[in-house]
Amino acid sequence: MRRIFAQITSGEVIPHAYVENPVLTKEGKERLIAWHNTLIRDERGNVVASLSSGEDITEKRQIEKEREALIEKLEKALSQVKVLSGLLPICASCKKIRNDQGYWIQIETYLRDHSEAEFSHGLCPECKKRLYPELTKKP
């Protein structure tokens, strides 16, 4: 520190008003310290002292890193989300949807193309009974 102070007082080094650097504690742990520095001058403008105050910002920086990681994760997730909104013209009979080009397409195709939805098909009990009555007769 004496060497650095000598360089500052001689004008060889211009100190930064704000600096962050790691400091090793007595327990051997590294802490990040934010230093605020200023020079004290005599009446002739010569540097006679420096004044520094330090603030431990270790937790603050860790929280900021976690926050940035979470924001990045949320932005990535949001970029992958497809949202359906607005009015969908749908046929009251066959349930096809009219797309932006004016073509009528199956609802599954429209939803697959405009969302992340995947489909598997089956028959509800009413349709099974109507389409395959022989399979639904009770003995």
Image: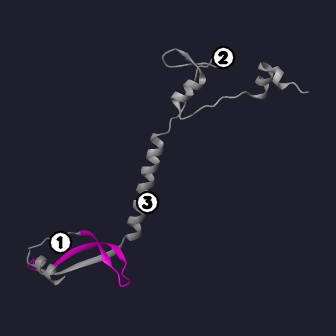
Residue 134's quadrant in the figure? top right
Residue 51's quadrant in the figure? bottom left
According to the image, what is the colour scheme of the structure? Answer: one colour
Query: How far is mark 1 from mark 3, CA to CA?
Result: 31 Å
Q: Earlier in the sequence, mark 1 or mark 2?
A: 1
Residue 34: in magenta span: yes
Q: Earlier in the sequence, mark 2 or mark 3?
A: 3
Query: How far is mark 2 from mark 3, CA to CA?
Result: 50 Å
The residue sitting at 76% across, 23% down in the picture is: 127
Query: How far is mark 1 from mark 2, CA to CA?
Result: 77 Å
User: Does residue 13 appear left or right of residue 57 in this picture?
Assistant: left
| Residue found at the very far right of the displayed protein | 139
The residue sitting at 40% across, 65% down in the picture is: 62
Query: Pointer 3: what residue?
Result: 66
Residue 25 at x, y = what percent? 35, 81
Query: Pointer 2: what residue?
Result: 94
Q: Please state which of the two labelled residues, at mark 2 or mark 3, is closer to the viewer.
A: 2
Residue 90 at x, y = what percent? 61, 19
Main SS type for the magenta part? strand
Instruction: State the residue in front, 75 or 121.
Output: 121
Q: Residues within 10 Å of mark 3 (few under 14, many from 20)?
A: few
The kind of residue on which mark 3 rests is: Glu
The kind of residue on which mark 1 rests is: Pro
Q: Helix, strand or loop at disc 2?
A: loop
Query: Pointer 1: what residue?
Result: 15
User: Does residue 135 appear left or right of residue 58 in this picture?
Assistant: right
**On screen, residue 73 above or below 92:** below
Q: Earlier in the sequence, mark 1 or mark 3?
A: 1
